[in-house]
Amino acid sequence: MSDIDTQQQIQQPEEPVFLIERVEQTAEQPQPPRYLWLHRLAAAGAVLALVLLALWGYRSCRHQPDLDLPLSATPEENIEKLQSGDTLTAAKETPGVVHTQDSILGVALDFYALHGVSASLEWQEPDTLDRSVFLYCRSADHKADSLYLGSLVVGGEEKPAYEGRLGYMAMADGRYVIGVSASDAVKDYVAERGGSFFRQMVLLSNGVLPNDFELHGKVERKAIARIGERYYFVVTRSKETMWDFADALREYGFLDAIYITGGDNYSYYRTADGQKHDIGDVAGYPHKKWKGIIPWLVFRQSTTR
């Protein structure tokens, strides 16, 4: 080595070297689950199910109020009436509708007592010249998605429906009954017999009003109601709330009553002498809006007499 190299080494100080000791990790570090996304998806599904269940419960409470309403007849008892023919629809009466009027609790009402007639649901609106028809009106309610509000059976064929209602009218073998129940026993019996069945809102159950009604405001109101085993079609002569209408029916003495939609929609009835009398707005006949969509509740001369 030359003197020059030796002198350069003396002039350039040696850089220090730092040694850093690493401590080995002996404990196992927690690892995320291999299928974490599945757990998160399951949790989200559970939350969604709870939300949907809560919404269903809320809608059920709104559309099926007062499940504890007192019953004047159980589903089994109404089935027995349809089987035995105890209802006056099968009695040997001269067919016809008797019209009377009265005012109860300030509510003016038209009463149409049904005598010697059978009931059925029909897709075609009756002709005004059909002398076998003694009264007809609307029945089930319908939504834009082609589903009916409440169970519906026409001629033994059940139609898609949802949002069950407690009130019902059942028709089989020329006889009919109305009642209140969440059970499908009467519906199933009627379907097996090739009969008809529809649900509507309850106005009265064994003389008791529901705590609340779905519909509010004032319009013309209609109902199918009964006192004993006599059935009536009842119409208000002015616009009324559901509560006032139902309260007037109770005060008059009706036990059970189900709502009939339609306001002042046209219909007619016949007296025992065969004369036709108009109900509602004559200009609305025929009802093209519901043609083939809404089944009509039609009362004809009884075939069981």
Image: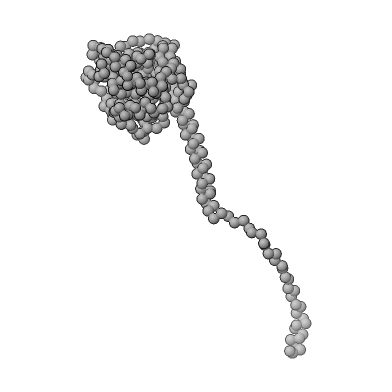
How many numbered tags mark residues here?
A: 0
Quarter-wise, where is residue 157 in the image? top left
- Residue 154: % across, % down: 30, 28
Q: Name the image quarter holding the C terminus.
A: top left
> Is residue 141 visible from the viewing direction of this image?
no
- Which of 41/155 is in front? 155
In the rendered view, tell whether residue 249 sits above or below residue 147.
above
Residue at left offset 30%, top offset 11%: 98
- Residue 229: % across, % down: 35, 15
In the rendered view, tell whether residue 34 sits above or below residue 90.
below
Quarter-wise, where is residue 214 in the image? top left
Q: Residue furthest bottom?
A: 2
Residue at left offset 70%, top offset 66%: 22
- Residue 133: % across, % down: 25, 19
Residue at left offset 26%, top offset 12%: 94
Question: In the image, is 106 to the left or to the right of 92?
Answer: right
Quarter-wise, where is residue 256 in the image? top left
